[in-house]
């Protein structure tokens, strides 16, 4: 592997500038070149920090054409930082082709971790996080969006979506129709910014609120939706064992204790029972 050139994949703040790590700041101030999704946006941000470095634009419309040039610079010994407008590059942002090409060329690729809207939203959503699926932005057009949601209806893992303000109400309405209005969900908007707000309710209630609350449709949003509740195969009596036991025990016992008992009776993995209990508790409350 080459010791000369290095590609740094640098996470930048999603709102609050204080979230830029000291390590990220040091890397951005010392590299030979910064490949930025929007050079004006990143330039203004770094100028506020007193950092001046050469830039090259690197976005979804020129990524394919820029890769060969950047890999050549890396091969020649350049130290390059890849940044997006906000958050962690490659997460619903450009960069995959560059990272893959650099790795194939033997270039050292180094992550400089930091803010990520999807992870930040998951951490405060109050929904299961042991397994989740990141879907990013759904198709903007209604028919394609609904088709994609139909394909996700049976997904048991927590789902994470990004959505633009002007499409949020329509997106929530389609999610509610596809998954059922009672599916637990959360919506996080303006994360780390002055008007940061996290809404936790059913997807149907969030969809209704988005129609009347103009504040919900201001700023980029992360939508977290609980996965489909999957019960055990039916017993002779026709009732799902795990779900039935949880429904009986959760109103009487602490969640953790109920999970321990059901796991012991059914032989199910505790983590699987725990995830189901979190969803069941929301339906029972």
Image (tube, rainbow, N blue to C red):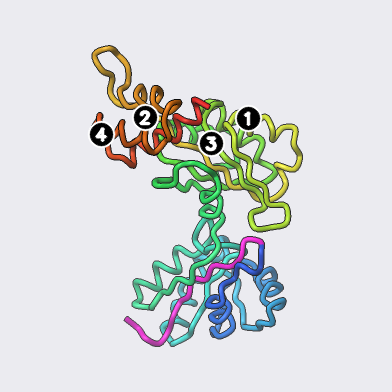
Q: Earlier in the sequence, mark 4 or mark 3?
A: 3
Q: What secondary structure is found at the residue carrying circle 2?
A: loop
- Crowding at mark 3 (Cα within 10 Å: few <14, some 14-19, many 20+): few
Instruction: Measure the alpha-carbon separation of dots 4 and 1.
Output: 36 Å
199 to the left or right of 107: right
Q: Earlier in the sequence, mark 2 or mark 3?
A: 3
- 169 is higher (above) or lower (below) than 132: above
Callout 2–callout 3 Cβ contact below 8 Å: no
- 127 is higher (above) or lower (below) than 251: below
Instruction: Measure the alpha-carbon separation of dots 4 and 3.
Output: 44 Å
Residue topped by disc 4: 264
Residue topped by disc 3: 144
Q: Earlier in the sequence, mark 2 or mark 1?
A: 1
Select label 3 or label 1 by which is in front: 1
Instruction: Measure the alpha-carbon separation of dots 3 and 1.
Output: 23 Å
Q: Earlier in the sequence, mark 4 or mark 1?
A: 1
Between residues 104 and 12, which one lies in front from this camera angle? 12
What residue lies at 49% left-to-right and 25% top-to-bottom?
284
Between residues 13 and 275, which one lies in front from this camera angle? 275
Select label 4 or label 3 by which is in front: 4
What residue lies at 67% left-to-right and 52% top-to-bottom?
190
Callout 4–callout 1 Cβ contact below 8 Å: no
- 158 is higher (above) or lower (below) than 143: below
Q: What secondary structure is found at the residue carrying circle 4?
A: helix
Region in magenta: 1-15
103 to the left or right of 91: left
Residue topped by disc 2: 230
Callout 4–callout 2 Cβ contact below 8 Å: no
Between residues 61 and 49, which one lies in front from this camera angle? 49
Position of residue 70 measured from the top left corner of the image (x, y, whole percent): 49, 77
Residue topped by disc 1: 205
Between residues 282 and 16, which one lies in front from this camera angle? 282
């Amino acid at each position: 592997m080459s010791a000369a050139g290095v590609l740094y994949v640098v996470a930048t703040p999603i709102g609050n500038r204080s979230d830029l790590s000291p390590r990220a700041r040091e890397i951005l101030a010392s590299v030979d070149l910064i490949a930025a999704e929007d050079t004006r946006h990143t330039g203004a941000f770094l100028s506020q920090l007193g950092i001046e470095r050469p830039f090259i634009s690197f976005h979804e419309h020129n990524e394919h054409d820029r890769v060969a040039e950047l890999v050549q610079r890396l091969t020649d010994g350049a130290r390059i930082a890849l940044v997006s407008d906000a958050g962690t590059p490659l997460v619903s942002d450009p960069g995959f082709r560059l990272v893959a090409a650099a790795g194939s060329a033997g270039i050292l690729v180094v992550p400089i971790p930091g803010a990520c809207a999807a992870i930040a939203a998951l951490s405060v959503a109050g929904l299961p996080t042991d397994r989740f699926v990141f879907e990013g932005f759904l198709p903007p057009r209604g028919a394609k969006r609904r088709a994609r949601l139909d394909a996700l209806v049976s997904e048991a893992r927590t789902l994470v979506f990004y959505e633009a303000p002007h499409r949020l109400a329509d997106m929530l309405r389609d999610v509610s129709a596809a998954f059922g209005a009672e599916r637990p969900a959360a919506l996080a908007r303006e994360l780390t910014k002055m008007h940061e707000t996290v809404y936790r309710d059913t997807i149907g209630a969030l969809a209704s609120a988005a129609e009347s609350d103009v504040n919900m449709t201001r700023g980029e949003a992360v939508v977290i939706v609980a996965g489909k509740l999957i019960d055990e195969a039916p017993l002779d009596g026709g009732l799902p064992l795990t779900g039935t036991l949880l429904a009986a025990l959760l109103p009487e016992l602490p969640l953790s204790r109920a999970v321990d008992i059901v796991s012991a009776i059914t032989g199910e993995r505790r983590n699987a029972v725990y995830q189901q209990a979190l969803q069941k508790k929301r339906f029972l409350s």
